[in-house]
Structure formats: C-alpha cells, structure tokens
Image (cartoon, rainbow, N blue to C red):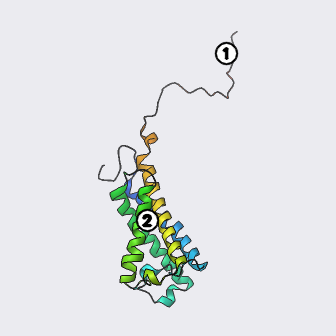
Amino acid sequence: MDPQGHNPKNGTNIWMFTLEIGLFGGLIWGGIKGVFYFMRLTTVVPGFMVEPFFKSQFLKSQPGYYVGWGAFIVFSLLATLIYVLIFRKFSGPVPGILYGIAWWVILFVLAGPTLHLMEPLRKLSMNTIISEFCLYLLWGLFVGYSTAHEYTDERKREPQEMSDKPQKNPLKKPTENPQH
C-alpha cells in the first residue's frame, strides 16, 4: 500500500472506502434505529450514545432524534475504520455478524449500563433487547460483508484481456466491401 492509501492490487483507496461504508452504514441503520424507536420496538432512544452531553428530554424530541442519528453515523464511521484496519481480509458474512454482536455486547451489556446511557439489560424489555440485537447484527453484517466483498473479490484481481484488435459486435451486420 502506498502512502496515499491506494492498494496496487485493486486500486481501492482504503480510507475513502472506509468512510463510504461507515457513512452509509450509519445512515441506513441509524435511520432504521429511529424507526424502531418511533414504532416502539425499542425503548432505547436513538441518541443514547450522546446521553452525557444532552438532556434526556431533548434526545426524545425530533431534533434530538437527528442528533442521535448523527451520533450513530459517527459511531459507524469509527467502528468501520476499526473493522477495516483489523478484519478486512476475512471473507464471508460471519466476521461482520460477530463484529455487530460484539458492538451490541459492548454498548448494551458493558458500557451502556456502566455509563448510565441506558437501563441495565435485565430492566429492558425483551422487545428492546431483540430489536437492538438484530439491528447491530445486521449493521455488522453490512459493514463486514461490504468490506469483505471489496477486499476478497477474486474476480477483480484477474487480469483483463486487452487486445489491439477492435472487438466484433455480434449484433451488428457486417458491411459489404464494394468492389468495382
């Protein structure tokens, strides 16, 4: 890899690729997290990660929802960077799924209750636990599989056949060579 982040094997700029996956992961799954909250599938506010910086009442409002969505995007960017730096060479969906589950454990079992970002797991409803678990599992699948597809897709590494001859178009009728 050169200093600009270009990988000579496939030409992907690792940093821009990471930002892209993290941004879209945050936009998509952060938006779904908000939908889960408004549909009452979870009682954990979308902005729970920024709970120490904002009042709980604000985070339950419409502007607070957008702050929470933004926080999820930032989280997704940072977590995707970690994944790409450590796990990008793993193929298949399983590493991403495990990564999403690991983040769920970190946020909902370890850090969340300890930092008073949310209620302890035993006080959350089963609906909340399952919804949040599935959300992080699918988010991890998105991050992991998108990364694995980019870095382990063997078809991209096969050399392209280049020829100086123009390719024949099978749909085009041959032109007649008029001879006088």
Q: Position of residue 132 (x, y in %)?
A: 50, 73
Residue 99: x and y in percent read 40, 63
Q: Nearer the viewer, residue 13 or 118?
A: 118
**Residue at 35% in and 48% down:** 7
For numbered disc 2, what is the local secondary structure?
A: helix
What residue is drawn where x is 42% and y is 81%?
50
Res. 100 mark: 2
Question: Of all residues shown, which one is farthest toward the left?
Answer: 3
- In depth, the one of 88 and 2 nearer the eye is 88
In this view, the residue farthest toward the top is 180
Instruction: Give the amino acid type for the residue marked by disc 2 in the picture.
Output: Gly
Judging by the rendered image, the residue that carries numbered circle 1 is: 177
Residue 148 at x, y percent in the picture: 43, 52
Q: In the image, what residue occupies the spot 48% across and 80% down? A: 47
Question: As displayed, is residue 146 above or below residue 40?
Answer: above
Counting from the top left corner in percent of width and height, residue 19 is at 42, 62
Would you place residue 163 above or below residue 22 in this image? above
Q: CA distance from mark 2 to mark 1?
A: 65 Å
How many numbered tags mark residues here?
2
Label placed on residue 34 = none
Find residue 172 and report its image quarter: top right
Amino acid tagged 1: Asn
Q: Quarter-wise, where is residue 178 in the image?
A: top right
Q: Is residue 135 above or below residue 53?
A: above
- Of the 4 image quadrants, the one containing the C terminus is top right
Q: Kindly identify the residue that appears in the image at 48 percent across and 89 percent down.
A: 56
Element carrying mark 1: loop
Q: Which badge, 2 or 1, is on the more N-terminal residue?
A: 2
Crowding at label 1, few (<14), some or many (≥20) Cα neighbours within 10 Å?
few
Labels 2 and 1 touching (C-beta < 8 A): no
Q: Nearer the viewer, residue 45 or 67?
A: 45
